[in-house]
Image (spheres, grey):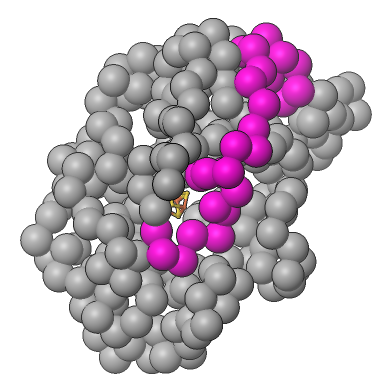
Amino acid sequence: MVAEAVPRAKPGETFLLSECYASIQGESSFVGVPTIFVRLYTCNLRCVWCDSMYAVEGGEFREVSIADLVAEVRRLAGGKGRGPRHGISNVCWTGGEPLLQWRSIAEVVDTLPPSFVHTVETDGEVDLAPFDAAVRPKREDGLVRYIMDVKCPGSGMRANRAFENLRLLRPEDEVKFVLADRRDYEFAQEMLMKHETAAGTILFSPVTAAHKVPQGLDPAALARWILDDRLNVRLQPQVHKYIWPGETRGV
Ligand code: SF4
């Protein structure tokens, strides 16, 4: 079998883009907020329940310049001149693993005006430090925020770098554990005891059948466990999967 060659964008010049669209944010403390999603292609991990494998492998991407992506974000933002309740001002960088293309993301963050807030959904296993330094002024202003996974055993992956990255997080950042079963829940609890972070929000997100697994984790069971243990975390079902059941792209 011939392995798929890993494509590369030109750092600081282009992106490997899977898709770019406007939708409703289905996760994190931005849940329900209209958001522009920039889904970048390819990933350093292969989670068994990945629901966006088309952005990980298979070659479905196009290479776009930074200028073209900035123009696309501005077009999708819309609402110009229609008053303060119009226009989309949240940009979510996702994937795949977006921080594999951090130099190009930093260019876009720098180019777009401070009316945009950027959230970066990262798998936790890429060092945050270089990107963090590159976007420092907007990070200081709370305009760049992380939603960082800590991979649990049920993903088939192993959290490693995430524990270093936890130290770079700030109160406006969020840490996400995607939980497939009780073992993952206990793992997440243990990690929260062992590793300190300044991140203000901890998300416990149940795997659902929409994650291309035969069986997910019952959200009611997860709710019970959280309440029984009096855990100060946020139960986070993926709201877009309730709004658009069965849709896998553009949501
Ligand atoms: S890190 Fe995210 S995009 Fe990559 S394989 Fe895992 S779930 Fe999929």
- Residue at 51% x, 18% y: name it: 9
Residue 180 in view of the camera:
yes
Q: Identify the residue shown where x is 86% and y is 30%.
A: 79
Q: Is residue 69 covered in magenta?
A: yes
Q: Position of residue 109 (x, y in %)?
A: 53, 19
How far from the left and from the top, in percent, is residue 47?
39, 59
- At 32% across and 71% down in the image, what residue appears? 154
Q: Quadrant of residue 146?
A: top left
Q: How many marks?
A: 0
Residue 218, above or below 8: below
Report the front residue among 215 and 38: 215
In the depicted view, which residue is nearer to us: 17 or 139?
17
Q: Is residue 233 visible?
A: no
- Is 224 a magenta residue? no
At 9% across and 61% down in the image, what residue appears?
194
Which residue is most to the right? 82
Q: Residue furthest left?
A: 194
Residue numbers of the magenta segment: 47-73
Quick check: 199 left or right of 109? left
Quadrant hosting residue 118: top right
Q: Is residue 105 left or right of residue 33?
A: left
Residue 163 percent location from the top left of the image: 17, 47
Q: Position of residue 223 (x, y in %)?
A: 42, 85
Position of residue 191 relative to residue 2, above or below, is below
